[in-house]
Image (spheres, grey):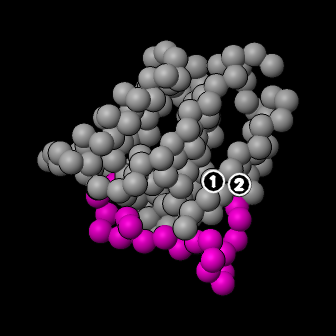
């Protein structure tokens, strides 16, 4: 079982996570300013530059997770503090989101307006899960996510 937790304090964010759920922070223009690493062989390969995001989304071992709550070797990855500016958007999500939509696609939803657009993101992800395209990922899975934006401090 994965876990993702975020600590927001003043104008900083710190991530804590276990497993393949991920946390992103996107700036007002859609630039990803913070991203956790999925605790999986494929996630580590992407981080090391051995696979790109598209290769990872279609990799046969994408479903393998190397760090889970309850395992004897479990560890909680504690991220460094990072700036969380007004109008930044925090996205915490299960792997169902990241296995079906590219990071740039995900970052577009909060960039284009209110965080209420998350229902459209859920619809796009569900459609992708059931409608495999030639070069599009399609992995039926759980889908849970949270968008958070603080417009001022």
Give the numbered dot on residue 4. 1
Front residue of 77/143: it is: 143
Residue 56 position by quadrant:
bottom left
Q: Are marks 2 and 1 in contact (CB under 8 Å)?
A: yes
Q: Nearer the viewer, residue 75 or 116?
A: 116
Q: Residue furthest bottom?
A: 72
Q: Residue at x 44, y 23 (%)?
A: 117
Residue wearing tag 2: 16
Residue 63 colored magenta?
A: yes
- Circle 2 residues within 10 Å: few <14, some 14–19, many ≥20: some
Crowdedness near tag 1: few (<14), some (14–19) or many (≥20) residues, C-alpha within 10 Å: some
**Can you say which quadrant of the picture contains the C terminus?**
top right
Residue at the spot 71% in from the left edge and 45% down from the top edge: 6
Q: Nearer the viewer, residue 128 or 46?
A: 128
Task: Answer above or below: position of 47 versus 70.
Answer: above
Q: What's the magenta bit mostly, secondary-structure-wise? A: loop
Where does the magenta region start and end?
Answer: 57-77
Residue 57 in the image, given as x and y percentages of width and height: 34, 55
Quarter occupied by residue 148: top right
Residue 151: x and y, percent?
69, 16
Percent x, y for residue 31? Answer: 54, 28
The N terminus - image quarter: bottom right
88 with respect to 55 (left or right) = right
Q: Is residue 27 above or below residue 1?
A: above
* Residue 42 to residue 21: above or below: below
């Amino acid at each position: 079982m994965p876990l993702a937790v975020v600590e927001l304090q003043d104008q900083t964010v710190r991530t804590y996570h276990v497993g393949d759920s991920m946390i992103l922070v996107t700036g007002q223009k859609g630039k990803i300013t913070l991203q956790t690493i999925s605790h999986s062989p494929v996630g580590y390969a992407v981080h090391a530059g051995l696979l790109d995001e598209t290769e990872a989304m279609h990799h046969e071992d994408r479903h393998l997770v190397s760090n889970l709550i309850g395992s004897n070797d479990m560890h909680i990855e504690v991220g460094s503090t990072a700036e969380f500016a007004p109008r930044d958007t925090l996205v915490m999500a299960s792997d169902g989101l990241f296995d079906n939509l590219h990071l740039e696609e995900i970052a577009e939803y909060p960039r284009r307006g209110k965080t209420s657009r998350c229902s459209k993101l859920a619809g796009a992800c569900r459609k992708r899960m059931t409608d495999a395209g030639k070069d599009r990922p399609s992995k039926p899975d759980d889908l849970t996510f949270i968008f958070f934006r603080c417009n001022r401090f």
